[in-house]
Image (cartoon, helix red, strand yellow):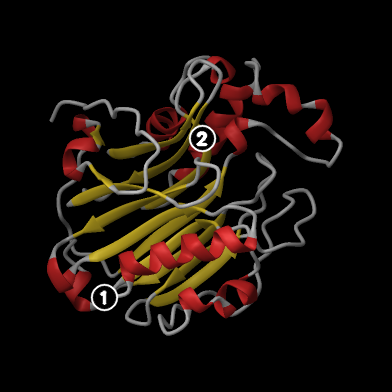
């Protein structure tokens, strides 16, 4: 299957479906359908490959959000090696190829470094040559459907990716998202997400949600979905001394949390969060 280049996504409120046509496949790494009882998941806000290891680095290294840095790809290589042990990875704050990244699509770069056969980039804020703010998905399983969803907000630039494995009731629906900072906007975004997932029995929400878990669970938009997570609080921010649980993986009760942890990793200002989920028999042939 020839690699297909994704196109820039305009800012509008309706979803833009790409189906399988928007997915990138590295043909020589394609894998067949196998029976599996579990999936290993990881969500990571990579901060466009900037190592922020102290608060003062936001000032002293802030220029790297605008200009290229010779060590950025070394950081991406380290991240890529970290990702190799996971089946599906959700990326936030990746660059799709601009001046600051040396015109490298960081989602594609990490797919190659992590040896993933399938990858997908969602362009959320297109600043031309200056920045290509993106989310991304890396997968070892071939999705049956991929869809872009710009999230509502006063300022465009936040998005969710819907990835489906399988079909019908025996499908696994994964939503990769990066929520805004403001509570009112988050409520609108979570209501939008609820409309995508509330009628699906097997759902995973994963990403940078910019909110502690107890606050998310109290939001009306998530009530009644009965989403579960790790039993303990898993702080991910700031990476050098994590105190705040901002990154989460939430799953339907039909799925099982087998393990969950935050990785001891300071390659970004967030630490990655990992979870192994058990699959019911109906999902073991994805």
Whether residue 267 is visible to the viewer of this picture, yes or no, is yes
| Lower position in the chain sequence, tag 1 or tag 2 | 2
- Image-based side of 264 in relation to 18, left or right: right
Q: Residue furthest front?
A: 154
Residue 37 screen position, x and y as percent:
28, 70
- Image-based side of 200 in relation to 152, left or right: left
The quadrant in which residue 35 appears is bottom left
Residue 103 screen position, x and y as percent:
48, 16
Q: Residue at x 17, y 52 (%)?
A: 144
Residue 236 screen position, x and y as percent:
67, 57
Tell me if mark 1 has few (under 14), some (14-19) or many (20+) residues whose alpha carbon lies within 10 angstroms of its own. few
Residue 4 screen position, x and y as percent:
21, 27
Of badges 1 and 2, the one in the foreground is 1
Q: Residue at x 53, y 29 (%)?
A: 77
Q: CA distance from mark 1 to mark 2?
A: 30 Å
Image disc number at residue 199: 1
Q: Is residue 53 above or below residue 102?
A: below
Q: Residue at x 72, y 62 (%)?
A: 244
Q: Residue at x 43, y 25 (%)?
A: 105
Which part of the image, by quadrant, shows the N terminus? top left
What secondary structure is found at the residue carrying circle 2?
Answer: strand
Q: Is residue 155 above or below residue 209?
A: above
The quadrant in which residue 51 appears is top right
Q: Which residue is mark 2?
A: 94
What secondary structure is found at the residue carrying circle 1?
Answer: loop
Q: Is the Cβ of the residue at disc 1 closer than 8 Å to that at disc 2? A: no
Number of labels in the image equals 2
Whether residue 143 is visible to the viewer of this picture, yes or no, is no
Q: Is residue 107 above or below residue 180?
A: above
């Amino acid at each position: 299957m020839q690699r297909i280049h994704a196109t820039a996504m305009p800012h509008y409120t309706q979803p833009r479906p790409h189906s399988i046509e928007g997915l990138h496949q590295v043909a020589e790494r394609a894998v067949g359908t196998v029976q599996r009882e579990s999936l290993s998941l990881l969500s990571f806000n990579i901060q466009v490959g900037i190592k922020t290891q102290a608060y003062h680095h936001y000032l002293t290294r802030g220029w790297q959000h605008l200009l290229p840095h010779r060590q950025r790809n070394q950081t991406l290589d380290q991240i890529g090696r970290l990702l190799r042990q996971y089946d599906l990875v959700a990326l936030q704050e990746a660059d799709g190829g601009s001046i600051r990244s040396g015109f490298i699509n960081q989602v594609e770069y990490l797919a190659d470094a992590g040896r993933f056969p399938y990858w997908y980039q969602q362009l959320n804020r297109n600043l031309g040559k200056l920045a290509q703010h993106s989310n991304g998905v890396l997968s070892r399983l071939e999705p049956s459907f991929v869809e872009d969803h710009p999230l509502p907000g006063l300022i465009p630039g936040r998005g969710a990716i819907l990835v489906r494995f399988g079909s019908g009731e025996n499908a696994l629906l994964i939503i990769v998202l990066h929520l805004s900072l403001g509570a009112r906007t988050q409520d609108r975004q979570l209501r939008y997400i609820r409309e995508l997932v509330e009628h699906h029995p097997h759902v995973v929400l994963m990403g940078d949600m910019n909110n502690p878990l107890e606050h998310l669970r109290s939001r009306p938009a998530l009530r009644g979905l009965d989403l579960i997570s790790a039993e303990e609080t898993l702080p991910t921010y700031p990476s050098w001394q994590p105190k705040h649980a901002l990154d989460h993986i939430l799953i339907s009760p039909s799925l099982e949390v087998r393990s969950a942890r935050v990785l001891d990793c300071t390659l970004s200002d967030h630490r990655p969060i990992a979870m192994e989920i058990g699959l019911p028999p109906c999902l073991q042939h994805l």
